[in-house]
Image: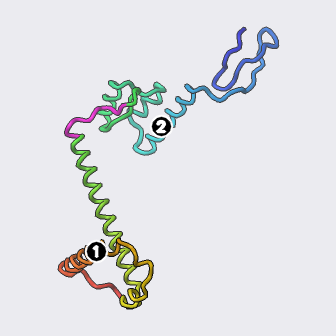
Amino acid sequence: MKNAAVGTSLKLVEKIEPNSAEVVVLEQPSDRALEKRLLLNSADTIEARIGKNAYSDYIRHHRRLPDPKEASTIGSLIGGRVRASDGTLQPLLSNADREWRRQVRSRRKEAARRYQQILRFRQAIVALAQNEDDPLELIAGDSVLFDVDEIAQNMDRALDWLSRFAEEWHRHGKKEARP
C-alpha cells in the first residue's frame, strides 16, 4: 500500500502487519481543511452578529461559499450583500445604491472634517488660556521660538477666524463658562 494522508493531520508511514498501520502526526491540517474551518468560523461570526440566516445555513450545509448567482439570491432574501465564491459581493449594487453610498461617505467625511476643526479649536483655546505672562514680555524676551514664518503667516488669519467665531458664539446665545 502506498503512503497516503489520513484525515487532516495524520499520514500513513509504515505497514506493520497486513491489516494495520502505524500512524504519526506529521503535518499541519491541509489547506482545504483550514478553509472549511475558516468558513465555519465565518458562519459562527455571522450568526453571532446578525443571527442565523440563509447565508450562514448555506455555508454550514455546503462547506463553501455560494456561486455568484446563488449569492445574489441569498443576498436578496436576507436584504443585504453576501460574499460569493469568486470574491464578489452579491447582489451587485445598482446605480442608485452606489450614488447613495457616495452621498453617505461624503456626509461622513464632512462630519469628520468639522469634528477635527472643533477639536483643534478647543485645544487652542485651552492652551492659550493657560498663558499668564503679558504678551509684550514674551515678545521682548526675543526667544528663538518666535523666529519662524508660521506665526507671521497665520496670526492674522487665526485672529480673524477667532473673532468671527466669538461673534457667532455670542449671537447664538452660548453661555459663559460655568464656575
Q: Nearer the viewer, mark 1 or mark 2?
A: 1
Tell me the kind of residue under disc 2.
Ser
Q: Residue furthest right?
A: 16
Q: Position of residue 71 (x, y in %)?
A: 35, 29
Q: In which quarter of the image is the N terminus?
A: top right
Q: What element carries label 2?
A: helix
Q: What element carries label 1?
A: helix
Q: In this view, does 123 lie above or below 100?
A: below
Q: Residue visible at 46% across and 44% down?
A: 48
Q: In which quarter of the image is the C terminus?
A: bottom left
Q: Is residue 20 above or below residue 75?
A: above
What stretch of residues is rendered in magenta? 88-97
Residue at which label 1 appears: 158
Q: Which of the two labelled residues, at mark 1 and mark 2, occupies the earlier sequence position?
A: 2
Camera-nearest residue between 72 and 159: 159
Residue at which label 2 appears: 42
Question: Within 10 Å of the Cα at label 1, are there few (<14), some (14-19), or many (20+) other Cα atoms?
Answer: few
How many callouts does the rendering have? 2
Whether residue 70 sits left or right of residue 168 in the image: it is right
Camera-nearest residue between 51 and 100: 100
